[in-house]
Amino acid sequence: MTGTVSAEIPVSADNRPRHVAIIMDGNNRWAKERRLKGVAGHKAGVDAVKAVVETCAREGVEVLTLFAFSSENWRRPKDEVSALMKLFLFALEREVRKLHRNDIRLRIIGDRSAFNATLQEHMAKAEALTQHNTRMTLVIAANYGGHWDITQATRQVAEMVKSGEVSPSDITDDLIQQHLSIGDLPMPDLMIRTAGEQRISNFMLWHLAYTELYFSPVFWPEFKEDEMRKALQAYAGRQRRFGQTDDQIAAKPVQQ
């Protein structure tokens, strides 16, 4: 699905995604077009994050997952990675209380062992502060990769087999999913990628099996309320089949 909408479709509880996942792409290209350093694009992207979080919360989205830093992003120039870490820490220090005031729960997924102790401490404090909030769950994927997520879940299940808690024949999709980073949350209904790229880049590989995909040509710093609403409207016009036929869907509601 591309970022075009033929006609505006009202978004309601019946056609609204419960879980939206976003690959926030295009910060560097946005900065390059303006002859700025890459970090300027990342700083501008923070405003887009705020706008999208606010829009999704107002629209009744239950879970919003943002791909902030992939396990492959460590390969970027050291000065850019350092700036990203400082920006992440700044956001944790300054923005988490705003999330808390707005009843939004924060969860951070990914391998935290690569982050410094100060950043890990602020992650834990931010999650603890917001853990009982219920309006919406904001998931930040940091040092995250879909391969890593499936691997760590598989290791946990293997330990269960080793201890005799389960047998190999007990291993099911549901058991593995329970041990994924956010296996307790609804699977993503809508995955958005900005900046015109049309790939999922090792993001939530297990979770995206039946997710509707939406690719926007807009760079992330410019993807704000209007663009988010376009994506929600595009999703509202989709018919989700989950392997069923049109006749089956017409006969009864489809459950994931």
Image (tube, rainbow, N blue to C red):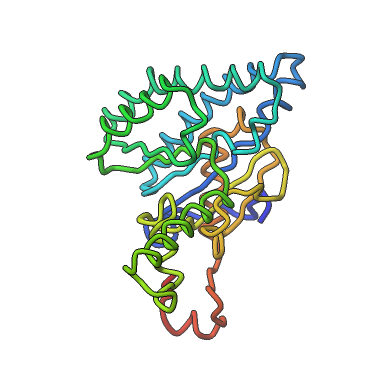
x and y percentages locating residue 15 in the rendered image: 44, 60
Quadrant for residue 180, please give it: bottom left
Work out whether 82 lies above or below 231.
above
Q: Residue at x 48, y 55 (%)?
A: 188
Q: Residue at x 68, y 52 (%)?
A: 2
Query: Could you tell whether 58 is left or right of 129 in the image?
Result: right
Work out whether 162 lies above or below 201.
below
Q: Residue at x 39, y 76 (%)?
A: 170
Work out whether 143 lies above or below 249.
above
**Looking at this view, is 73 or 166 the one in front?**
166
**Looking at this view, is 200 or 168 the one in front?**
168
Tell me the quarter of the image containing the C terminus.
bottom left
x and y percentages locating residue 72 in the rendered image: 65, 38
x and y percentages locating residue 214 in the rendered image: 62, 51
Tell me the quarter of the image containing the N terminus.
bottom right
x and y percentages locating residue 152 in the rendered image: 48, 52
Q: Residue at x 45, y 41 (%)?
A: 109
